[in-house]
Image (cartoon, helix red, strand yellow):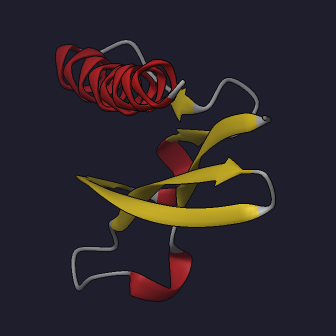
Amino acid sequence: MRFRISLQVKKTKKGNDEKCPAYARCVMDSRRIELSTSIYVTLDDKDNLRQEIAGNSQEVRILNNRLLKFVSGILTSMFMLYYYCL
């Protein structure tokens, strides 16, 4: 079983304030699902290499912590389902 999570910014859903929603794409065995993180970022703030928001301000740190908690929650749920189904 192969499982991976990537964070993506939906450019097509840009709002009036020039911010785009961040989505978590989960792929498991060629099946995918996209989950909304309810976090909005500008396109300039997204760091694709590190899969987080670039910057060092307090607001950016809070958003990065929210993204990390979101991904951790997905991983925790996936592992619990996997081990309980065995």
Quadrant where the N terminus sits is top right
**86 above or below 10?**
above
**64 above or below 6?**
above
Q: Residue 15 at what x, y percent from top left?
A: 27, 82
Which residue ends up furthest to the front in the rendered image? 86
Image quadrant of residue 47? top right
For the residue pair 30 and 44, the one nearer the viewer reads as 30
Q: How many labels does the image show?
A: 0
**85 above or below 61?**
below
Residue drawn at x 48%, y 65% is 34
Residue drawn at x 68%, y 52% is 27
**51 above or below 80?**
below
Q: Residue 85 at what x, y percent from top left?
A: 47, 31
Quadrant where the C terminus sits is top right
Q: Residue 46 at what x, y percent from top left?
A: 55, 43
In the shown orientation, is residue 36 left or right of residue 49? left
For the residue pair 10 and 57, the one nearer the viewer reads as 10
Image quadrant of residue 57? top left
Q: Residue 72 at what x, y percent from top left?
A: 38, 20
Residue drawn at x 61%, y 32% is 51
Residue drawn at x 37%, y 21% is 80
